[in-house]
Image (tube, rainbow, N blue to C red):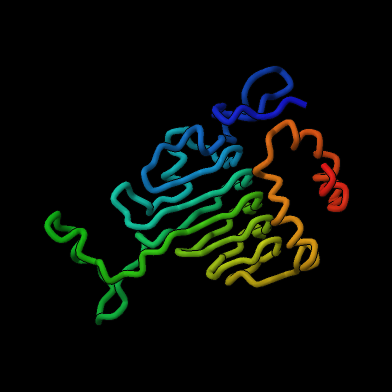
Amino acid sequence: MPFLDPRQPYPITLADGTPYRETVQLAAVIDHPRIEIGDFSYFTHSGEADETAAILAPYLYPFSQERLVIGRFVQIAREAIFITSSANHAMSGVTTYPFRVFSPETIGGYQDLPFRDTVVGHDVWIGHGATIMPGVTIGAGAIIAARAVVTRDVPPYAIVGGNPARLIRMRFTDEEISDLLALSWWDWQLDRIERALPHLESGDIAALRKS
């Protein structure tokens, strides 16, 4: 099978040969100083390609202190959103109104807020309308259910859902998860991934070890 070109903005080609323009490869369409993206990660939305960063992480600005880091082969469905630390308001006073942001002299004055990176591991599936809150780390192979609100870290290969998101189940045993993290198939050369595709799709970890 032909593999993706990581430079291709629209990775899906319809049967009539036209590109499907609502699914974009993030690394090919986002140029943002506070966003780091691995190859082959995609997001589906109805905006223009150059609006992707603003749709996915609307509160992450070029001058923000935090980063959004997304691994390889991440799958992000429509309406998923990252609420990053720059969206926070100070809550230690009487009011949460952000007076300082309305003056260029004081717009950067909220230095005491907890600016934390949001990190998404490799091969994570983020379902329709999921909300990822500031500073969360999502482990490799995790699945985030539709409309989940993720407020805390998610272990590798966990399935979480709800508001706030809670563990539904683990996808594999502890031993299998250790094996998968050690294999790190997402770092393999594409021709090796292609050869191993039957094992990746079947969940045959023993066969995957031999690939």
Q: Residue at x 70, y 29 (%)?
A: 3
In the picture as drawn, the residue positioned furthest to the left comes out as: 105
Q: Position of residue 190 (x, y in %)?
A: 69, 33
- The answer to whether residue 51 is left or right of residue 186 is left
Q: Position of residue 100 (x, y in %)?
A: 18, 64
**Residue in front for this viewpoint, 199 or 210:** 210
- The answer to whether residue 84 is left or right of residue 177 is left
Q: The C terminus is located in which quarter?
A: top right
Q: The N terminus is located in which quarter?
A: top right
In the picture as drawn, the residue positioned furthest to the top comes out as: 17
Q: Position of residue 202 (x, y in %)?
A: 86, 47
Q: Residue at x 81, y 34 (%)?
A: 195
Q: Find residue 109 and report its image quarter.
A: bottom left
Q: Residue at x 67, y 24 (%)?
A: 13
**Residue in front for this viewpoint, 141 or 14:** 141
Q: Find residue 116 and report its image quarter.
A: bottom left
- The answer to whether residue 32 is left or right of residue 195 is left
Identify whether 127 is placed above or below 97. above
Q: Position of residue 207 (x, y in %)?
A: 87, 47
Q: Residue at x 85, y 40 (%)?
A: 198
